[in-house]
Amino acid sequence: MTACSKEKPVTNIVKSDFGVLADGSKADLYTLTNANGMEVKVTNYGGAITSWTAPDKDGKYANIALGYETVEDYVAGSPYFGAIIGRYGNRIAGGKFTLGDSTYQLPLNDGPNSLHGGEKGFDKVLWTATPADGEEPQLKLSYLAKDGEQGYPGNLQVTVTYTLQKDNSLKIDYEATTDKETVVNLTNHTYFNLAGGGAITDHVLTLDADRFLPVSETLIPTGERRAVAGTVFDFTRATRIGDGIGAGDEQIRFGKGYDHCWVFTDSSTTLKPVGRVSDPKSGREMEVLTTEPAIQFYSGNFMTGEYKGKGGRSYPYRTGFCLETQHYPDSPNQPSFPSTLLKPGETYTSTTVYRFL
């Protein structure tokens, strides 16, 4: 008689320790791996993507996302590396907005404005994680933002789901409900470097956006939707990021580079391709798809080298860029912008996919 042995099942999502917070609570790290060998690591602290490997033209995998090795590093100081951003991504002028007869004041954590949810946004809280193994591993993160938290009204129940798909894409699904009228604008703040290191100025970017939102000196949209044609904001054709980043354009001076919102030519809420970015040297190319009406392209203008990543490696000026799919900045104060209002009984939904080609 021949003995039978069962093969050990392949596990495509693995949980490990990521450190301890000041209150004694523990942060976890989840490693998602697909059949191709792509690996995405996510911590339940801030829902942050800490690393993400992608193949180059020779099939060699390397990390293309900026991040830290422990939760203590994220707590000590992070420019939102890889994190879930909320309750409102981007800036709100004066940290103030009005709903009905009530005016709400938010923390001012970006000069005279409120940025990315305030002093303790969704990037600085511990989420409840529910992993699901399988051919396309999935991590569901949940958080209840209480009424009055960071000045926002309503108990907001939020769920963000990361799914690492077979085609080397990471799908991010957002969902939220509230018991009181509030504003919501969720996004992800991963800093990409498709070369795996060095400056991102040689990366080539395409955006399906024929307009962008000019800003004031404090980076609040003026309300204008300006045509990109004939400007350094025109990425309707594949353009090297560094070509316009040092221009004397007033908008470039205000942002110290690109830190602006582009409005998609297709304003539908269907999942649609909206942009591509590539690194000619490594051959890596990433496509972005989203249901959102706009994207914030940030070229790492405020990176100074003070942030030390994996292995003590520093992240100097413009060594990472962000493509944050979202609604417009300051929408609660600008009625001509698409609404970010969420009412009781409604469900906020949004989907973004980052696909490596």
Image (cartoon, grey):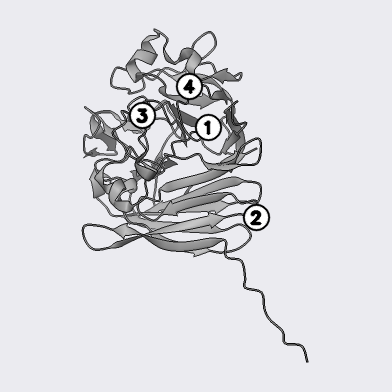
Q: Distance between the Cα atoms at labels 1 and 2?
A: 23 Å
- Label number found at residue 316: 3
Looking at this view, name the residue that lies furthest to the bottom. 1
Pointer 1: what residue? Answer: 195
In the image, what residue type sits under mark 1? Ala
Most foreground residue, 167 or 121: 167
Q: Image quadrant of residue 104? A: top left
Pointer 4: what residue? Answer: 201
**Foreground label between 1 and 4:** 1
Q: Residues within 10 Å of mark 1 (few under 14, many from 20)?
A: many
Earlier-in-chain disc, 4 versus 2: 2
Name the residue rendered at 32%, 17% in the picture.
216
Pointer 2: what residue? Answer: 35
Most foreground residue, 271 or 85: 85
Q: Is residue 111 above or below residue 226?
A: below
Q: Residues within 10 Å of mark 2 (few under 14, many from 20)?
A: few
Q: Element type at marker 1?
A: loop
Q: Element type at marker 2?
A: loop
Location of residue 206 in the rendering, given as x and y in whole percent from the top left corner: 58, 24
Earlier-in-chain disc, 3 versus 2: 2
Earlier-in-chain disc, 1 versus 2: 2
Location of residue 231 in the rendering, given as x and y in whole percent from the top left corner: 50, 10
Most foreground residue, 354 or 307: 307
Name the residue rendered at 56%, 46% in the picture.
170
Q: Distance between the Cα atoms at labels 4 and 2?
A: 32 Å
